[in-house]
Image (cartoon, rainbow, N blue to C red):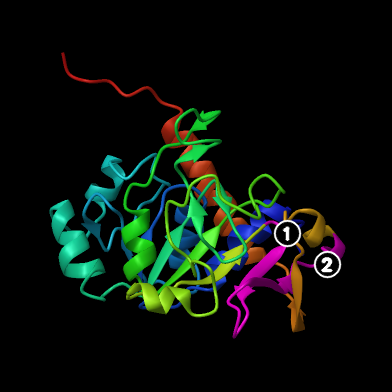
Amino acid sequence: MTAWTRDEMMTVAAARLLWDGCVCFVGIGLPSAACNLARLTHAPGIVLIYESGTIGTRPDVLPLSIGDGELADTASCVVPLPEIFAYYLQAGRVDVGFLGAAQVDRFGNLNSTVIGPYESPSTRLPGAGGAPEIAAHARQTFVMLKATPRSFVPALDFRTSAGFLEGHGSRALSGARGGGPRAVITDFGILTPAAVSQELELSALFAGATAEEARAAVGWPLLVAEEGETLAPPSDVEVSTLRALHARTREAHSHPVRLPA
């Protein structure tokens, strides 16, 4: 079997959560890699939607941003951005919102706005974009994030997108229509919400990872599910497909873009 890295396992584990025919609202970065890996392997009929208005896009390389021409060139159709939110997302037609973030807390709330106090942050991040709407309205959300105590925090510096809020059913009381975060995929395994408290707990580990490693990477006392599992390693097909996708992307992005005078 082909050797693999933790980063590759992370992407493969995220891709495996998606299914053929799934309608998925995709974030740029790690979520985009996972969703396109799923499309190129076990879920060829997945419908990928990006915030710029591209529906059913099938990029050959990973996009640099939601405005990357590769998305429009390979889409089934392109609609105005307000229609994506009003007629697809808010209308309940999105099965999965796949998001990244800079911080996540124990209830799956996300920060992609600032690190430090909002008025004088140490780092100003790219911002919310469509993430708050996706988190509120998608039938379920998945989050991909490498785990450190700085990214998995007891309290967010800013709550950009709602997960389960304070847990214990508080999301349902807020009026948010979507189902909330069903999985947070890290570089050691997968966290899922506990049934009653809705606090994220360790439910699956990658081969070679340990619960002690997971606890050390998280900034709160991480709970471990009673019936946790060890995820199967990536297959040769999954690894080779992912590496080929990244290789095409590096090649495509290595050439300068020449704009007409």
- Percent across and percent down for residue 50 are 30, 55
Q: Is residue 158 left or right of residue 59?
A: right
| Mark 1 residue element | loop
* Residue located 65% across and 52% down the image: 153
Q: Quadrant of residue 225?
A: bottom right
The answer to whether marks 2 and 1 mark residues whose Cβ atoms lie closer than 8 Å is: no
Whether residue 235 is visible here, answered yes or no, is no
Q: How many marks?
A: 2
Q: Residue 242, relative to residue 255: is it above or below?
A: below
The answer to whether residue 171 is seen in the rendering is yes
**Left or right, 156 with reference to 85:** right
User: What residue lies at 47% left-to-right and 52% top-to-bottom?
Assistant: 159
Start-end of magenta stretch: 187-212
Q: Which residue is mark 2?
A: 211
Residue under the point 49% across and 80% down: 169
Residue type, mark 1 in image: Trp
Q: Quadrant of the C terminus?
A: top left
Which of the 4 image quadrants contains residue 99? bottom left
Q: Whole-Å distance between the Cαs marked 2 and 1?
A: 14 Å
Which residue occupies 23% across, 69% down?
Answer: 90
